[in-house]
Image (cartoon, grey):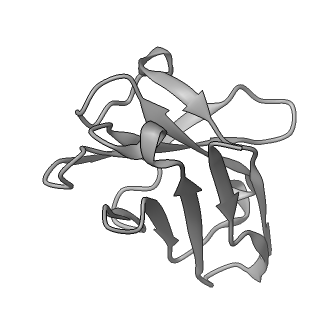
Amino acid sequence: VQLQASGGGLVQAGGSLRLSCTASRRVFSNNGMGWFRQAPGKEREFVAGISWRGGSTTYADSVKGRFTISRDNAKDMVFLQLNSLKPEDTAVYYCAASRTSMASRARDDYRYWGQGTLVTVSS
């Protein structure tokens, strides 16, 4: 397994969660990383991306100001802090490694995908 996401769970609206993703060094090094999510019956959508050195981040408008992506290059890990959660944030969240070192919003830019972790937000 090259990417492993964890940290999902059941939380009430307004609550917080922190998702983690562990990657193999080969997949993680020099690559941008991202988080996507897929709600039941919907397409997988971009959530957040971060560049290799962490200096550039980008977010979907729906999560801007509530979610924060970060990475620890010494540990080959990427994180997604989810605050002020809403029921519409309920989805399976996936981490992914980009083909480039940049923060990208485009699904096609991501080459490696982990299994998802389920986030359920109750109202």
- Position of 7 with respect to 58 (left or right) is right
Extreme residue in the left direction: 55
Extreme residue in the front direction: 26
**Quadrant of the image containing the C terminus:** bottom right
- Position of 95 with respect to 55 (left or right) is right
Residue 122: horizontal and vertical position, in percent?
82, 74
Is 3 placed above or below 102 here? below
Extreme residue in the top direction: 108
What is the tally of numbered marks visible in this picture? 0
Residue 20 quadrant: bottom right
Residue 85 quadrant: bottom right
Asked whether residue 60 is in view, the answer is no
Q: Residue at x 47, y 25 (%)?
A: 110
Nearer to us in this view, 53 or 82: 53
Q: Residue at x 62, y 84 (%)?
A: 15
Residue 14 quadrant: bottom right
Q: Residue at x 57, y 59 (%)?
A: 21
Residue 54: horizontal and vertical position, in percent?
21, 55
Is 21 placed above or below 94 here? below
- Position of 93 with respect to 72 (left or right) is right
